[in-house]
């Protein structure tokens, strides 16, 4: 157990500061055996224990934790796309040179949903991993 404590002691957890970034946006995944040590270091965070293999790696049984949050992220993304489109359409209704319509609202929201679905496709993820993410 002393070894686990030293692992946590050497890690930079960051300072949540006044924004409350640890607790405000949900939990952070850590191996189940390290949850108590992380909670002792940063109690304001929500630490989600991920199941471990006997060798100490992360087990696939915890994949549902990640997938559940991905579903919510997709819904929030599409909802924000709808909100942005609605804001634009309402703003256009005050401009005499612009026409506002529900067709634009529908097609923009559909485009946001198509973007979410495309982003989750394995081919897109592979391209992103090889082309874009190495440079960020």
Image (cartoon, rainbow, N blue to C red):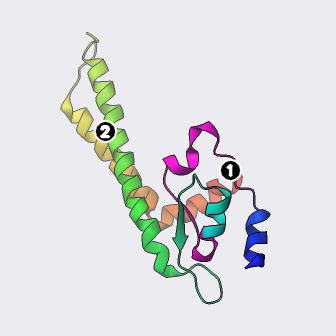
Seen in the image, is 58 located left or right of residue 98?
right
Task: Please tell me how crowded label 1 is: few (under 14), some (14-19), or many (20+) other residues with Cα within 10 Å.
Answer: few
Q: Is residue 46 above or below residue 49?
A: above
Q: Is residue 12 above or below residue 4?
A: above
Q: Residue at x 53, y 78 (%)?
A: 51
Residue segment shown in magenta: 12-35
Seen in the image, is 90 located left or right of residue 130?
left
Q: Which residue is at the front of the view, 25 or 23?
A: 23
In the picture of the structure, the residue carrying the numbered disc 2 is 82
Q: Position of residue 135 (x, y in %)?
A: 70, 52
Q: Which residue is at the front of the view, 102 or 28?
A: 28
- Label placed on residue 136: 1
User: What element does badge 1 sit on?
Assistant: loop
Indicate the quadrant where residue 108 lies.
Answer: top left
Q: Position of residue 12 (x, y in %)?
A: 75, 56
Q: Position of residue 11 (x, y in %)?
A: 75, 61
């Amino acid at each position: 157990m002393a070894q686990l404590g030293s692992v946590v002691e050497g890690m930079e957890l960051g300072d949540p500061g006044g924004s409350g970034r640890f607790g405000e946006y949900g939990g952070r995944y850590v191996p189940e055996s390290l949850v108590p040590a992380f909670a002792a270091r940063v109690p304001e965070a929500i630490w989600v224990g991920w199941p471990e293999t006997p060798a100490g790696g992360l087990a696939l049984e915890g994949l549902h934790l990640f997938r559940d949050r991905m579903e919510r992220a997709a819904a929030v993304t599409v909802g924000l796309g709808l909100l942005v489109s609605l804001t634009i359409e309402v703003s256009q209704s005050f401009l005499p040179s612009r026409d506002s319509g529900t067709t634009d609202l529908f097609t923009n929201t559909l485009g946001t949903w198509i973007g979410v679905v495309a982003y989750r496709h394995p081919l897109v993820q592979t391209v992103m991993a090889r082309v874009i993410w190495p440079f960020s």
